[in-house]
Amino acid sequence: MIRLAIHGGAGVIDREQFGGDREQRYREALRDITTATHDRLRNGASALDAVELAVRLLEDCPYFNAGHGAVLNSDGVAEMDAAVMDGRERRCGAVAAMKTTRYPVSLARAVMEQTEHVMLAGTGADRFGASVGLEQVDADYFITDDRRRQLTAAAREGRISLDHDEKYGTVGAVARDADGHLAAATSTGGMTNKLPGRVGDTPVIGSGTWADNATCAVSGTGHGEYFMRSAMAYDIHARMAYTGDDLDVAASAALKTVASMGGSGGVIAIAADGTVALPFNSPGMYRGWVDASGEVRIGIYQDDG
């Protein structure tokens, strides 16, 4: 059973302020990316290939806080984090605070497949990406006018923001392929006006990203410091592995732990049996998924999709 889910971030998405043409553009982007990735899975792609493709497409879309369109740190620079995990043997790769590799998710996969390490950071990560032939771009490539305006506003108000209007712009994907293998990938620019060098949950395996064929694949979006403190993604796996919880129960319980500490956000997850869960404790989460009938579905608010 082929299954797929993607997310483009969660948070305070006001239906009245966000609606109209802008909302339609986001829905169309989510549908196009979900459909393109689903088509690749139906044509025999592995779960790992599928999640990398989905996240690359999200990184290319300026609407979301990853790759081109990532938010800016207090120096006005896009510092990005990403991770991938293959559920077959828990192989994983991650990058943190990188600045010049066009597709952070592909750099994370290269770390997994072409090094003995799990995580590379900063200039060393980008230097490795260049050495293995991954496309390098000028740091300005990632910056959009919207992100410059957001940084100016955040700096003026002296705040660190999880994307404009408090939306969490991390992107991610989880997939189950025709052979039953699971994979997850996550990518983010982090927080507007964050301190240079700040790293969130996305590249921390077990916090924002997890995959194990025996249980589930998970990608999270939210206030990363709380996801790290709760080992959110691993918590879902552990509840399934050690107590026998089903995916819905495990994902909801893990998110409640985040909320109990003051954090918020959301999760996309797929279980070994193909069950999909998409819980979030904020007003909205950009999401696309393939249901049991093979239909692509899209949602933003709590009451749609």
Image (cartoon, rainbow, N blue to C red):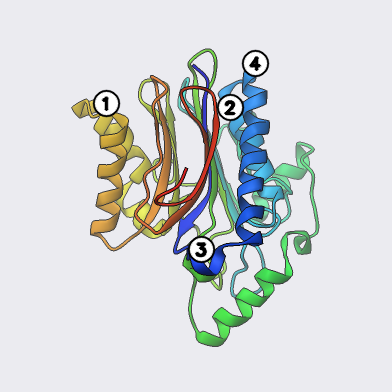
Mark 4 — residue?
44
The numbered dot on residue 178 is none
On the question of residue 118 being in view, the answer is no
Q: Residue at x 70, y 45 (%)?
A: 103
Q: Considering the numbered disc 2 on the image, is that residue within a helix, a strand or a loop?
A: helix
Q: Are marks 2 and 4 in contact (CB under 8 Å)?
A: no
Q: Relative to 83, say whether 85 is above or below.
A: above
Q: Nearer the viewer, residue 244 or 63?
A: 63
Q: CA distance from mark 4 to mark 3?
A: 38 Å
Q: CA distance from mark 1 to mark 2?
A: 22 Å
Which is more foreground, mark 3 or mark 1?
1
| Of callouts 1 and 2, the N-terminal one | 2
Q: Are marks 3 and 1 in contact (CB under 8 Å)?
A: no
Mark 3 — residue?
198
The numbered dot on residue 48 is 2
Q: CA distance from mark 3 to mark 2?
A: 27 Å
| Of callouts 3 and 2, the N-terminal one | 2
Q: Residues within 10 Å of mark 3 (few under 14, many from 20)?
A: some
Q: Residue at x 65, y 57 (%)?
A: 63
Name the spot of residue 220 as percent of width and height, x first.
44, 46
Q: Amino acid at mark 4?
A: Gly
